[in-house]
Amino acid sequence: MGEWSIFETCVTALMAGLAFALRLLFNRSEDFERRMTSQETRLAVVNERTIEIFHRLERIEAKLDKLLSK
């Protein structure tokens, strides 16, 4: 193997730095994806509850209309 030249050492260090940066980038993108999935799930629950509330309000309105028409 022998001694490494300064150029080989710099290239190796640069490649290691790039690999480390790519690993950080992929880890952060995975974390972001997990957070987005969590937010989408919460939003779906809120939408479902909103629809449920509107259905309840429609039933209440129908009952009030029925009572007022008597």
Image (cartoon, grey):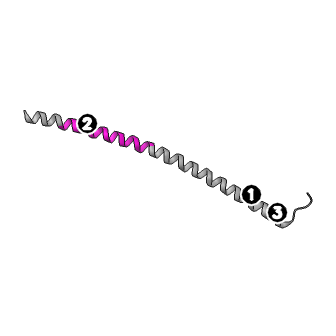
Residue that badge 3 annotates = 9
- Crowding at mark 2 (Cα within 10 Å: few <14, some 14-19, many 20+): few
- Which residue occupies 36% across, 40% down? 48
Q: Residues within 10 Å of mark 1 (few under 14, many from 20)?
A: few
Q: Is residue 45 above or below residue 8?
A: above
Task: Tell whether position 47 is magenta.
Answer: yes
Magenta residues span: 41-61
> Which residue in the protein does label 2 denote?
56
Q: Secondary structure at mark 2?
A: helix
Residue 44 at what x, y percent from top left? 40, 42
Q: Amino acid at mark 2?
A: Arg
Q: CA distance from mark 1 to mark 3?
A: 11 Å
In the picture provided, is 27 more to the left or to the right than 49? right
9 over 49 or under it: above or below = below
Above-or-below relation of 61 to 33? above
Outermost residue toward the right in this view: 2
For residue 19: magenta? no
- Residue 10, placed above or below residue 58: below
Q: Are marks 1 and 3 in contact (CB under 8 Å)?
A: no
Residue 8 appears left or right of 22: right
CB under 8 Å between callouts 1 and 2? no
